[in-house]
Amino acid sequence: MPTQTNLAARLTAAERRYHAFSGQLARIGLIAPGSVVSRYTRCGKAGCRCQADPPRLHGPYWQWTAILEGKTVTRRLTEAQAQRYREWIANDRQLRRLIPQLRRAAHDAIELTLQADQPAPAEPPSPPLRG
């Protein structure tokens, strides 16, 4: 059984880890799920460069796609919007990596708090003295 001093030091360390992770969480900017891709397409005009051999496709056209509320959503973007979405998606990935670490630190702190709340085990009685 860990000593109360050791337990208190471990609890303090777990709480520090938790607060460090929650501080990182607070600094994450806007978040967005999904992905950004560039697309090149062909048009239907005869004689267009995209119909040549080899074809020179039109584009790039930037596109964001995500699943929101169970439905696939796609949006065309400008290049500047695509860059912003990439940042928001990176923030979302950082958030997803951070949450399990935050949960683990909270779990450790909770377990150590519960251990610290337990009364110290009573020492076994000393054998009677014979005399």
Image (cartoon, helix red, strand yellow):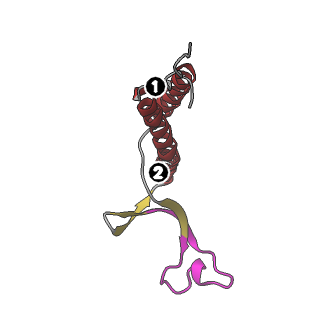
Amino acid carrying mark 1 in the image = Ala
Image vertical order of residue 37 relative to residue 20, above or below: below
Give me the C-alpha separation between circle 1 and circle 2.
Answer: 60 Å
* Residue 53 - label: none
Q: Determine crowd level at label 2: few under 14, some 14-19, many 20+ residues with C-alpha closer than 10 A.
A: many
Give SS at disc 1. Answer: loop
- Numbered circles on residues, count: 2
Q: Nearer the viewer, residue 95 or 82?
A: 95
Q: Is residue 1 magenta?
A: no
* Residue 122 - label: 1
Query: Which quadrant: the N terminus?
Result: top right
Q: Residue at x 46, y 59 (%)?
A: 34
Outermost residue toward the top?
131
Question: Is residue 100 among what the camera can see?
Answer: yes
> Quick check: marks 1 and 2 in contact, CB under 8 Å?
no
Question: Is residue 60 among what the camera can see?
Answer: no
The region drawn magenta spans: 40-65
Q: Is residue 47 magenta?
A: yes
Q: Residue at x 55, y 19 (%)?
A: 5
* Residue for badge 2: 85
Amino acid carrying mark 2 in the image = Tyr
